[in-house]
């Protein structure tokens, strides 16, 4: 009997440990700035946020060069002149969802995530509003928030000050599923 129970117990523990972690199946992070000359927008589709549904810990790592712009020249300027992707290749968010969520119950939940947002090597405390939707075993995170370039040491060249707004709108939509170890 002991020989049978040990593998069953091990399998249950392993499944429980990994099912607490959710990883993005899909994630789209975009930003948009309206300017008098030309609107600036980009999309990053390769980020894979992680969420621990037991602790509420939420982590994201964004590869800055993965933002795709409509015009290649905008993408080049973004990476070389603004976020300096060669020096600061990634942006990060590491925080915690503040509200207790019942992940066994489908529905929409208004949430806030409090943590550290790091862009251009500069870390800032942030609380970001969003919606967490539980549906049939998946978790969808949605958020719209603003990022002030100056807060993160991103300098807008004098030639473009007054043309490029100092704040951009950021939108995140991520669909997460339980992490399964292969």
Image (cartoon, rainbow, N blue to C red):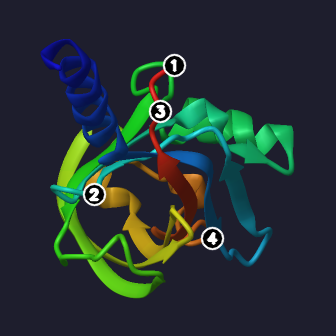
Point out the frontmost of discs 2 and 1.
Answer: 1
Distance in Å between CA atoms under marks 1 and 4: 41 Å
Q: Residue at x 34, y 36 (%)?
A: 15
Check the image and report above or below for 6 versus 156. Answer: above
Give whichever of 161, 109 is nearer the camera: 109
Distance in Å between CA atoms under marks 1 and 3: 6 Å
The first of marks 1 and 4 along the sequence is 4
The residue that disc 4 covers is: 33
The residue that disc 2 covers is: 53
Give whichever of 174, 91 is nearer the camera: 174
Task: Indicate the secondary structure of the residue bearing disc 2.
Answer: loop
Q: Are marks 4 and 2 in contact (CB under 8 Å)?
A: no
Q: Residues within 10 Å of mark 3 (few under 14, many from 20)?
A: few
Instruction: Residue 180: give its label.
Output: 3
Distance in Å between CA atoms under marks 2 and 1: 20 Å
* Residue 35 locus on image (x, y percent): 69, 74
* Residue 8 locus on image (x, y percent): 28, 27
Check the image and report above or below for 37 versus 125. Answer: below
Residue 30: tell me if it is visible: yes
Distance in Å between CA atoms under marks 4 and 2: 33 Å
The first of marks 4 and 2 along the sequence is 4
């Amino acid at each position: 009997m002991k020989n049978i129970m040990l593998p069953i117990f091990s399998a249950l523990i392993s499944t429980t440990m990994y099912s607490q972690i959710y990883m993005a199946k899909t994630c789209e992070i975009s930003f948009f700035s309206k300017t008098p000359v030309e609107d600036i927008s980009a999309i990053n589709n390769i980020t894979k946020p992680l969420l621990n549904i037991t602790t509420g810990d939420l982590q994201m790592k964004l590869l800055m060069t993965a933002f795709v712009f409509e015009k290649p020249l905008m993408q080049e300027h973004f990476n070389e002149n603004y976020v300096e992707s060669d020096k600061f290749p990634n942006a990060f968010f590491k925080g915690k969802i503040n509200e207790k969520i019942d992940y066994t119950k489908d529905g929409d939940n208004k949430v806030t995530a409090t943590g550290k947002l790091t862009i251009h090597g500069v870390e800032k405390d942030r609380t970001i509003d969003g919606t967490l939707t539980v549906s049939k075993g998946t978790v969808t995170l949605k958020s719209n928030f603003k990022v002030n370039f100056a807060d993160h040491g991103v300098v807008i060249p004098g030639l473009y000050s007054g043309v490029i707004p100092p704040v951009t709108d950021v939108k995140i939509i991520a669909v997460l599923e339980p992490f399964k170890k292969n």
